[in-house]
Amino acid sequence: MRYNIKTSGMGCAHCIAKVRKTVEKLGAKTESIELNDIIVDFEGDKSMLSEAIENVGFHVISIEEA
């Protein structure tokens, strides 16, 4: 499933790299990642994505099917 994730708190390239690494550890394929806007393909539960992103210090505003 393809998800569009809106976050807050991502302010630099290091933040982007941290989030990319985090979601890819879950098996998600990152299609696009910019400050506070991420699109991934992920077959697991979207709550897993939210929890992982929150655990590395960023707030998840929404996760919607893209």
Image: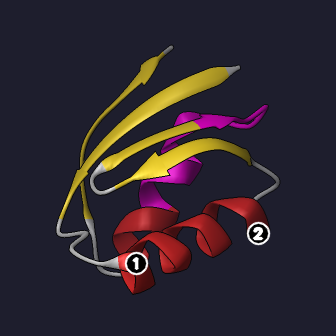
Q: Residues within 10 Å of mark 2 (few under 14, many from 20)?
A: few
Q: Amino acid at mark 2?
A: Lys
Instruction: Using residue 11 as the reference point, say whether residue 17 is left or right of it.
Output: right
Give the alpha-carbon distance from disc 1 to disc 2, as whole Å.
18 Å
Q: Which residue is mark 1?
A: 13
Q: Residues within 10 Å of mark 1 (few under 14, many from 20)?
A: few
Quick one: SS at disc 1? Answer: helix
Q: Nearer the viewer, residue 50 or 24?
A: 24
Q: Quadrant of residue 54?
A: bottom left
- Vertical side of 22 occupied by 31: above or below: above
Q: Which residue is mark 2?
A: 25
Q: Position of residue 57 (x, y in %)?
A: 30, 80
Residue at figure coordinates x 74%, y 48% from the top left: 28
Q: Amino acid at mark 1?
A: Ala
Quadrant including the N terminus: top right
First in sequence, mark 1 or 2: give its number: 1
